[in-house]
Amino acid sequence: MTGTASDVHFEMVTRRPVDLASTLSPLRRGRFDPCHRVESDGTVWRTSLLPSGAVTYRLRQRGSNTVDVRVWGSGAEEFGAFAPGLVGEHDADAAGTFEPSHPKLVDAHRRYPNLRIVRTARVLESLVPAILEQRVHTEAAYTSWRRLVGKFGTPAPGPAPDGMRVPPPADVWRRIPSWEFHAANVDPRRAQTIVACARVADRLEEIVDLDRDAAHRRLRAVPGVGAWTAAEVAQRALGDADALSVGDFHLASIVGWTLLGRAIDDDAMVEYLADLRPHRYRAIRLLEISGHARKPKFGPRTPIVDHRWH
C-alpha cells in the first residue's frame, strides 16, 4: 500500500477469481447515480462515508484475481478494511458450494462462475435508497436519490468524475425538512422512515457484526422498514447471498415465468426456492446478469406518481 493519508493506492489479489463489474452492479442506483460511475473499460468509481471520513475509490480489474485500488479522501487509510468485502472475498468460499439443478441456473452459473455477493458494511448507504424504492417505480426512486444526494451530499474528494457526490451522513438525513423531501418527489411516509433510520443510524450500523436473524430484527424494528427493505440492505451491506426480496412487485412473477413458465406469488416463490438456501439471492443475481430473467408484458405500464402534486 502506497500514498499519503488522503491518497492511497494498492493492489488486491483475491483468493478466487472475481467478476468485478457484476459483483458491484447492485450498488448502482441508476445510470446517473452521483455516488457510482462506470467507465467504458469497466473501471468503477464510487464514493462512501466511512467512520473516519469521506472517500472516493476507484476499482479497476487487472486480471481474474487482481483488482487495482485507488482511494482519495480523509477515510482513505481506513478503506483497506472495507475493500475485501467490495470484491466479494467474504463470499469466495460460499460461492463454490452453489450447485443448482434447474437448467437455466446451471447455465447462468456456468457462464458467470466468478459472480460474488458484494458486502459494503455501510448500512445507511444501502438503507436510504432502499426506502426510496419502496412501492414506487425504480426510475422515480433513482431520481429522488440523485436530487437528495445532489443537494445534501458533499463533493467527492480526489479526481472523481464530474458530478460525483458523497452521500449525506446520518445527522444531515435526519435534519432534511419535509418540504425538501417533497421537492424530491418523496412522500411523507418514506421521508419519515428515512428520518427515523437516521436517528438510530449508529445502532443500525452495528448490524454488520450481528448474525443474520439479529440483523434483520434490528432493521425491522424501525417503523417503515419491512422484510423487503431489510433484504435489500442485507444483500448489499451484509453480503447476504440468501436475502430474498419478498414483497417485491415483480420478483415472484419473474421467478415463476423464468423457472416454471407461469406466474407465482411470494408464498409460492419462497416455497419453490427453499432448496436453494443459502443461495437464493445468488440465484436471482445469476438470472439477472445472464439474461434469463423474464416477465411477459400483459398491459400498459403503470404511471410514475409525482408526489409533489399531491
Image (spheres, grey):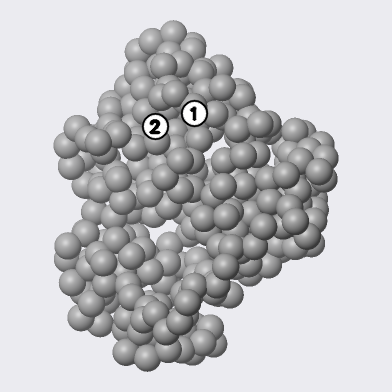
Left or right of 60: which side holds 50?
right
Q: Residue at x 33, y 75 (%)?
A: 294
Residue 215 horizontal side relative to residue 276, left or right: right
Please, what secondary structure does the residue beneath circle 1 have?
A: loop
Q: Nearer the viewer, mark 1 or mark 2?
A: 1
Assess disc 1: are there few (<14), some (14-19) or many (≥20) residues with their C-alpha within 10 Å of its C-alpha.
many
Q: Earlier in the sequence, mark 1 or mark 2?
A: 2
- What residue is shown at x 17% (from left), y 66% (from top)? 110
Q: Quadrant of residue 221?
A: bottom right
- Residue 54 visible, this orientation: yes
* 212 lies above or below 28: below
Residue underneath mark 2: 45
Q: Quadrant of the N terminus?
A: top left
Between 244 and 129, the one nearer to me in the picture = 129
In this orientation, which residue lies closer to the viewer: 193 or 77?
193
Question: Which quarter of the rendered picture does the C terminus lie within?
Answer: bottom right
Q: Residue at x 18, y 42 (%)?
A: 64
Q: Report which quarter residue 149 is drawn in.
A: top right
